[in-house]
Amino acid sequence: MAAVTERGSAVRQYDYVMGLFLLMVLVLGATAIFSASGGDRVEFVHQLIYIVAGAAAILYFSLTDYRSLGRLYGLTYIAVIGLLLLVRVAGHQALGAQRWIYLGFFELQASEISKLLMIIVLARFFHSRRDRIKSPATFLLGLALLVPPTLLILVQPDLGTAIVFVALFYGLAFMAEVPKRYLLGSLALAAALLPLAASRLQGYQRNRLITFLNPGSDPLGAGYNIFQAKIAVGSGGFFGKGFLTGTQGQLGFVPSRVTDFIFAIFSEEWGFLGAIILLSLFFLLLTRLLRASHLARDQFGALLAFGVATMIAFQVVVNVGMNIGVLPVVGIPLPFVSYGGSSMLTNMAAIGIVQSILIRRKDMLF
Amino acid sequence: MRRWFGRRQPRIVDPRNPRPRLKDPGRLDDDGLAPRDIRPHSKARPVPLRILGFGGFLVLAFGALGYNLFSLQVQQGAQYAELAEGNRIRQETVLAPRGIIFDRHGKQLVVNAGSFAASMVPIDLPRGAAERTKELVLLGRLLGLSPEEIDRQASAHAAEPFQPVVLKRNLDNATYEALSENEPNLPGIRLTTELSRHYIEGAAMSHVLGYVGKLDPDEYRDLHDKGYLLDDQVGKSGLEYADEQWLRGTSGQQVVETDAQGQIKARLQTTDPVPGDNVYLSVDIDLQREVVTQLQAGMDAAHKKQGGNLGLSGAAVVMNPQTGEVYSMVSLPDYNVNEFAEGITTQQYQALVDDRRLPLLDRAIGGLYPPGSTFKPVTASAALTAGTINQGSSINCPGRLVRGTTTFLCWNTGGHGSQNVVQAIAHSCDVFFYTVADQMGDQVLSKFASDFGVGRQTGIDIGGEVKGIVPNSDWKKRYFDEAFKETGDPAWQDSTWYEGNTITYGIGQSYLLTTPLQVLQWTSTVANGGHFLKPQLNNRITGIDGADVRPFAPVLDHDVQAPGQVLAIVREGLREAAQTGGTSGFVWNQAAFKNVPSPAGKTGTAQYGLPDAKGNFPTHAWYTAYAPAVDPEVAVVVFIEGGGEGSDVSAPTTARIMSYYFAHRDEIRATGPNPALAAGG
């Protein structure tokens, strides 16, 4: 009897409020994909399949004990490295970068999956070092974990994901209470070294580096395209141009409509009102993730949930920022909205893990 | 390393939770999560500062995004909406179909042939250097143009980046297919239909019709205020040039919605272009062809006789002396205007320019030649009007006129004996006109010559006309001094007007230079009793509804000073010249020309250039005539360059043309749509 009661309480422990916010984001996102996917709507149909698959991932990971995820974190880390190396060797090239691994029915974007795997690895690492968290060795070891996959991502090249990795590292280190002087000091050092390194490069080398890190950045072409996205957002006005009637999106002026610039499509058609509603939903979703981090019954869970919150928050802010022209374009998708199976499954699995943390915040039978 | 792979931690019983309720969490935590890691219930601890801090960061970040969105969408929304509209909406000019040119009976002389063209919208070409090069190479391969040429065109049209530029006209089927297949890979390229000019009478009417072509940069500078586009066509020569204002029509506008590749998605608003007005010429195309045939035959005969470079070119004009309607105007050799309309190649153009017979020169209005004896009616009119002579004055012609050491020969060195003015014209007595000119003086003669149109444009409604030279002592001084100052050539050094200059002036030599049309114009003025009319190639101009925009009306420039009775005397001389005993009587006496009622005409054999080894100068063969002698209805001039004797080649040619005219007189004189054509024949 007791077990049944506890099982019932497990169902009750799901954060349905978070689920509601997520559902609303998904619905808004799907309509945007519908609008941006052109006459055949093929991306829309695929995206629906990814959402359904993502829902299954939520269910699966919420029922899986999150603590078991960290158990073999060394192997997980090796899997990340292996996956990224596999992309180098057997990857499928598209848009000037090697990012996909063909799985027969699905093209896996290893960098998306590896974001979540890195959260698990880093959360588990900092957790295991909790007694020596103030030690410089902990920080340096953490950095040592971060650098190899980040470099592998950089040479794909995928500047966006590499930046996400760095953000995750600092987010988790911050939450794990690594001394702030290490974090700020290392960031300050990097900030100081970067322009120094850049200034030593010749103009053409710098351009080459920029092109290398961001192949879409043909100076004239990309600038034009980014501006078109900005025009799309701005021309939406307060109420938007209406569903399916955004001229910038429908007539193809906005680049990468279904992926990186889906927010521009959405904002053009739904205006400031729609954009603020979508951003608010993201904000509320993030507060629920932070709440989960607080409620977690152990530090590992708290770190995992915080890592997921960092990942989603960072990607939302950077993606929206580049859509409205206040941040540089660095190939980061808008979570739950941008078209793409790997990204959708990764983010949904992350939500599942957070739900698992919430379910298990009290001791219970499982 | 072991711990990285999950070293077992020693199990420690959490003192805060010594007896787990259902299941020992210690066993669950065998991956290192010792029971002691389990935190107190969340309600028992405050929200960590770090989570609050991160929450604060989110508030700031989302706040910044929201603020930027507000600024972009609400504050600057209107500006961006305008930019988006500018992207989407384009206003394009739709060129009007050019007016059609018909002959006087409504026979079509040009068509606007519809064809497929490949056009480029410069703004829609790929912006990335690599993509752009790729597209230009592909395009160049499909169109058979060099990528550099296309690139040059794109930069040349940078001022109108939204307006399509035709890259290649008259696409063949294979090219069209290849382009339409590749259209999705070719942003900024459009397949369009367009009208291009095709001249049905490509050669016979070449000098009259002229041709159209793309604007050159100078023309664009002058015309773009009038709505001309860089890719526009404009009349370049002939009537296409002169009638530009009628033929062009009014451009339409279309407001279109385009996608990012520049493909038209919808036409939002269209103002239809208004086609150009149709022009009906005074020319009768059948007569024109006949004149070409006859002039060519006359030239061939002259060339056969004269040899060398002589007799290879000529001009002929047929005009109604009462109205100024030009029934036919021919300059040979001609050229194929369609080569120009279709886009002439450099080689083709160079060949035309290098041709020593100068096929591009319209000799009828643009060539300057000494008129020779065809000028004698002007000398006679001047002398009679000025009172130098009267109807009864006679001058003895011993075959020569001696002034000091210089001897001026009459063409008939045997002498004409005593000649009055009528006889002198009929026999073309040089001594008579030497003497008259000498007595009259260069100033008087040049004044009357000007009155008869020498040294000024005839005012024909077509471009390219030259004025010629009406010389006198003032002119020689000014002209020679200037030429000497400029060139330093000793040939220009002596600017003194000599008596000999005046004497030869009387027979249309000296420094006199005229166009064949000027000769015809003074002949017509004599013929019609002194009305100096402007020759007109355009007859009437009609709008698309068929109603006259501008009906035909003769344009009288002025009435000459020579009074009617003077001109009647001159006409009598011209009539007798065409009769037995006159210089061209033997021609008109031929049975074939008996259908020409009472012709009147003047031969001309004008020396020019440098003498040959035997001291003989080459001569232009002239004949100017009208018929009938009373109330004339047709006037003809025939000029054969280096053709020899006027009576020998030009007079028979004129007679053939006149004979044709009178054989088809009623058809030619009629205007308006040909009844046969109207009936669908």
Image: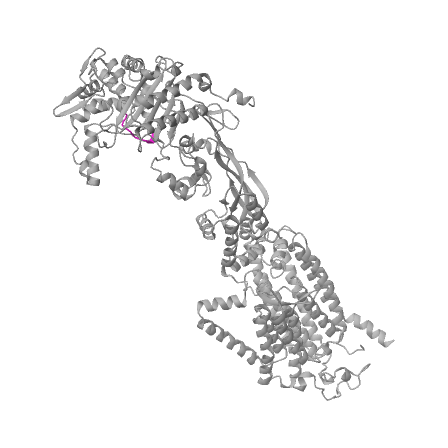
Residue lying farthest left?
B404
Residue lying farthest top?
B392
Magenta-drawn stretch contains B369: yes
* Residue A241 position (above or below residue A83): above
- Where is residue A291 drawn, in percent x and y? 69, 72
- Where is residue B678 drawn, in percent x and y? 54, 22
Q: Quadrant of the N terminus of chain B?
A: bottom right
Magenta-drawn stretch contains A304: no
Query: Is residue B642 something that shows in the picture?
Result: no
* Residue A38 position (above or below residue B270): below
What range of the chain is rendered magenta? B365-371
A281 left or right, relative to B579: right
A104 left or right, relative to A181: right
Q: How is the image coloured?
A: one colour
Q: Residue at x 65, y 81 (%)?
A: A125
Query: Is residue B18 something that shows in the picture?
Result: yes
* Residue B135 position (above or below residue B671): below
Which of A302/B119 is in front?
B119
Which of B481/A202 is in front?
B481
- Where is residue B520 drawn, in percent x and y? 33, 23
Q: Quadrant of the C terminus of chain B?
A: top right
Which of B435/B71 is in front?
B435
* Residue B288 position (above or below residue A47): above
Quarter residue A301 falls in: bottom right
B33 left or right, relative to B108: right
Quarter residue A113 falls in: bottom right
Which of A314/A84 is in front?
A84
Number of on-image labels? 0
> What kind of secondary structure does the magenta stretch mostly adopt?
loop
- Where is residue B64 drawn, in percent x and y? 57, 64
